[in-house]
Image: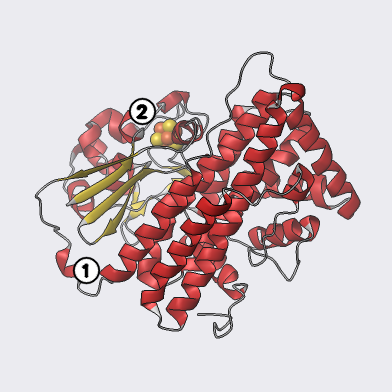
Amino acid sequence: MRYIKPDYYDKFQCTADKCPDTCCAGWQIVIDEASLEKYDEMTGSFGNRVHNSIDWEEGCFFQYEGRCAFLNEQNLCDLQKQMGEESLCDTCRNYPRHTEEYEGLRELSLSLSCPAAAEMILSQQGMPRFVITEDDRGDELEDEFEDFDLLLFTQLEDARKAVFDSLKSEKAPKIESGSHKENGFYQGLDRAQITLQDKMQKCMEMAEKMQKCVEEGRYFEIEECVRQFCDKQSSTAIEAAPNAADAKAYKTEGVGNDGAGTDPYEQKISLYRTMKQLERLREEWTDLLSEMERILYDGGRENYLRIQKDFHAWLEHVPERKACWENVGLQLFVFFVYTYFCGAVYDDWIYSKMALAVSSVEFIRELLMARWKKNGEICFADYAELSYRYAREIEHSDLNLNTLEETFMEHCCLPGIPPHI
Ligand code: SF4
């Protein structure tokens, strides 16, 4: 069996009662079969509490005012306190550790929805390292992979590797004390920004071509799409837009984009509308969305463009700010591509997986810009907070993930793809 994980994976530690949030509220905690049996056999007064705290029909813990029945006032788990770590169900024991299962391969990641994990993910500098290990254990799920499309999976893995290789030059710009515009530092930052945005656009183009190959049954040509992507990266290094303003006109056709063309305001409103129609898991998310709409979009196009311009001027005023912004964009993009892209082996939706990654970066950046406008500044804590709040709503709702992917597929500008697949 092969295993892949980011190199920071094993360093994760839950911050428990120091956590600014909790993973035991706001969503349904599904209990695995073995744990349900264990809970069923518990006796005594605590056993009674356990029996009464479980919705046996749904196989999950009851919630009171959105909080798990075992979550106490100190935001600690009474079940763990009373019965120890072993008493936890798989969901609680593993979170925020997440495993994607492929034939002969397990891909491990930390969920961005946990504040402590979000901090770890976003504080990586430059392209994160992934550790690959192998042991001689067989795949216990072998029978479930009878129809696994190994050829497509290999092509997806190759495409993802090509994307990551293209991002390797996206080092967080080196920050030297006394750096200023005249010594070329800003020039480097602008270029780094263009590079990430330009590369996300190139990734979208590659994904679109791959999707077309799948739709038309030209599976062997997928390799050619990846090769062309690699060639473009090495030959142009970057087809740099001449200045940062051009970079902001980055095209996101097809990314939740209701025919909005390349107008940045229309694009962002379109993405916002897509996000707004999704299922809500937490009240705070509704508040954040309303605030974002009021601050960024209600004032119209000119107002939005002015905020965007002022925001970028604020970022560029201090090199460290800009560097942090760029690096967080990179970490988010890598996170979403790593976690979701190869899952296309199960549904053939390659384009929508890449669109999910790009639009997640874009949307979290919009949330951050609204936070900046409201507070006059943003810091790393804002990056982590808004990222984990976004992930809580999107990553932990299959309904939301599916709706987003369906929307992206509708806008995949490919002939022959019906609006709803
Ligand atoms: S959200 Fe993360 S840090 Fe917070 S309690 Fe859960 S696992 Fe711990």
Instruction: Note whether 379 is above or below 24 in the view shown.
Output: above
Q: Which residue is mark 2?
A: 13
- Which residue corresponds to the image point at 79% horizontal and 28% vertical from the top-left? 376
Q: Along the horizontal axis of the image, is 146 left or right of 62?
A: left
Q: Residue at x 57, y 25 (%)?
A: 174
Q: Amino acid at mark 1?
A: Phe
Residue 164 position, x and y percent, is 44, 48
State yes or no: Cβ of the residue under disc 2 lies below 8 Å from any atom of ligand 1: no
Q: Which residue is mark 1?
A: 145
The total number of labels drawn is: 2
Q: Name the amino acid type tagged 2.
A: Gln
Q: Is residue 373 visible?
A: no
Local SS, label 2: loop
Q: How is the image coloured?
A: secondary structure
Crowding near the residue tagged with mark 1, few <14, some 14–19, many ≥20 C-alpha atoms within 10 Å: some
From mark 1 to mark 2, how far is it between C-alphas? 33 Å
406 vs 301: above or below? below
SS of the residue under disc 1: helix
Q: Rate crowding at label 2 as few (under 14), some (14 to 19) or many (20 or more) other CA atoms within 10 Å.
A: few
Residue found at x 41% / y 26%:
15
Return the residue nearer the eye: 236 or 52: 236
Q: Find ligand 1 in the image and state its quadrant.
A: top left
